[in-house]
Image (cartoon, rainbow, N blue to C red):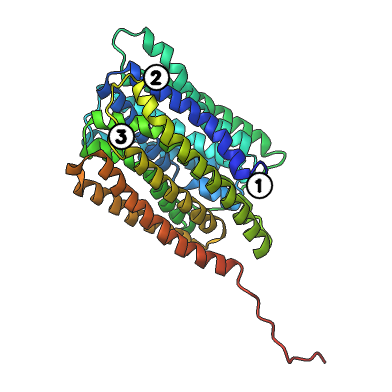
């Protein structure tokens, strides 16, 4: 396990996740439940909006080894501004956001998108440490916002988002500067590509579907249930959900560039087998720990301010295992699949996402736990479809060569 790049990556993600979890617990105790629910929704909207704004560029950077250039910066920034405005406009139509929050969301989404593109340069070069430091720093900034919120007479979600915005401005600027300097030494030269290509479309469709799926639980709960119930779920997700998310992201983060670099089928199988044993083994341990610690967290640190529904922790754990399965299959398609398979994976993601949303609306009268299982049904459909595509990508990449016999040289 100690030799697993996925677990080393998951460990770094877990460090950021620990900051995120602690910050959520403290903010859940400080903020009124409605404000904490709105904050959880805003953080999810930032992640979804940033994914839309990057137009699939992180996957293209990873697949092609692109390096920073003025053209790439322009292709990140100009569409990003337009798409960010569209995302925030849609959010204001779907949710009752506080005054001032939409403007903060717009700025935060744009800089978060630029930071993702910067991190992808280092992910492509398998410099996972730098890439993860850039992407995880805002989790600790969220924790740093706690003492500031404590000093306010009327703590609100907008204060926390303003602090998160400042962190994205700093980290995205540092990330692009480091990537630009590294591009003169050990990153590949930028390859020609077009934002209108099939590959770009496939990457954007898949990346957006995958990242909306990461946030669909909060987005759906915030819509079909109340902000108070969203606040309760956010507490559970900060602990139970984050553990599985770190393993899911860690697996996908390292497997894509490693599988892309594998020369043959035997080496690719070795990579997949070792990572699967390590990641799923740790997931079993995490599930046991979560089941033990969650009732204590609600009873002691949160002083029973939130009611823990029966079966909610188990639902998050079950869905967590399905999400890890999906990450392994998606990494195979992203690394080995053709443009056609990449686009098919994105389409499958959107269809599965539709399953989650419709199922969540259909069972909303049955409470929070059933809604989470309904969302998990979409994850199950997503993982199953992507597994079929992963097998197709595997066979395309490692198709046995046919040898023609019976031909003699003159």
Q: Quadrant of residue 177?
A: top right
Which is more toward the observer, 313 or 22?
313
Q: In this rendering, does residue 309 appear at all?
A: yes
Check disc 1 and report its element: helix, strand or loop: loop
Q: Position of residue 111 (x, y in %)?
A: 45, 31
Between 379 and 309, the one lying in front of the other is 309
Q: Is residue 107 above or below residue 327?
A: above
Tell me which numbered mark, 3 or 2, is placed earlier along the sequence: 2
User: In the depicted view, which residue is nearer to us: 54 or 310?
Assistant: 310
**Labels 3, 2: front one:** 2
Residue at the location (71% across, 41% down)? 186
Measured from the top left, where is residue 10 in percent x and y? 56, 39
Q: Under tag 2, what secondary structure?
A: helix
81 vs 62, left or right, is left
Spatial CA span between label 2 and label 1: 45 Å
Question: Is label 2 or label 1 in front?
Answer: 2
Residue 81 versus residue 350 in the image, above or below: above
Dot 3 lies on which element? helix
The residue singled out by tag 2 in the image is 26
**Which residue position is annotated with label 3?**
88
User: Mark 1 touching mark 3, by CB under 8 A?
Assistant: no
Image quadrant occupied by the C terminus = bottom right
Q: Distance between the Cα atoms at labels 3 and 2? A: 27 Å
User: Disc 1 marks which residue?
Assistant: 189
Q: Quadrant of residue 315?
A: top left
Question: Which of the two labelled residues, at mark 1 and mark 3, occupies the earlier sequence position?
Answer: 3
């Amino acid at each position: 396990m100690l030799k697993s790049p996925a677990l080393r990556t998951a460990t770094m993600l877990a460090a950021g996740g620990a900051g995120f979890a602690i910050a959520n617990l403290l903010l859940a105790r400080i903020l009124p439940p409605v404000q904490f629910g709105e904050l959880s929704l805003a953080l999810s909207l930032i992640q979804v909006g940033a994914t839309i704004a990057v137009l699939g560029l992180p996957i293209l950077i990873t697949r092609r080894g692109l390096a920073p250039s003025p053209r790439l910066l322009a292709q990140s920034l100009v569409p990003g501004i337009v798409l960010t405005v569209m995302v925030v406009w849609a959010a204001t139509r779907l949710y009752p956001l506080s005054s001032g929050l939409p403007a903060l969301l717009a700025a935060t989404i744009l800089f978060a998108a630029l930071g993702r593109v910067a991190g992808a340069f280092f992910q492509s070069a398998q410099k996972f440490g730098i890439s993860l430091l850039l992407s995880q720093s805002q989790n600790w900034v969220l924790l740093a916002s706690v003492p500031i919120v404590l000093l306010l007479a009327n703590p609100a979600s907008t204060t926390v988002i303003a602090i998160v915005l400042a962190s994205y401005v700093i980290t995205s600027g540092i990330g692009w500067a480091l990537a630009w300097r590294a591009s003169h030494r050990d990153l590949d030269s930028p390859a020609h590509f077009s934002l209108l290509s099939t590959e770009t479309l496939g990457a954007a469709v898949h990346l957006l579907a995958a990242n909306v799926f990461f946030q669909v639980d909060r987005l759906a709960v915030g819509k079909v249930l109340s902000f108070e119930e969203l606040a309760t779920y956010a507490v559970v997700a900060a602990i139970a959900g984050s553990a599985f998310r770190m393993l899911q992201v860690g697996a996908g983060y390292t497997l894509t560039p490693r599988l892309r670099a594998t020369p043959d089928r035997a080496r690719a199988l070795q990579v997949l087998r070792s990572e699967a044993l390590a990641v799923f083994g740790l997931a079993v341990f995490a599930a046991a720990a979560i089941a033990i610690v969650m009732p204590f967290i609600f009873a002691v640190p949160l002083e029973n301010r939130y009611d823990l529904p029966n079966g909610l922790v188990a639902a998050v754990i079950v869905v967590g295992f399905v999400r890890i399965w999906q990450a392994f299959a998606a990494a195979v398609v992203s690394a080995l699949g053709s443009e056609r398979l990449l686009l098919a994976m994105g389409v499958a993601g959107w269809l599965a996402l539709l399953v989650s949303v419709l199922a969540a609306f259909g069972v909303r009268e049955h409470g929070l736990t059933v809604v989470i299982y309904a969302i998990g049904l979409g994850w199950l459909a997503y993982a199953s479809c992507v597994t079929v595509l992963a097998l197709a990508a595997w066979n395309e990449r490692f198709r046995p060569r046919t040898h023609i016999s019976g031909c003699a040289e003159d």
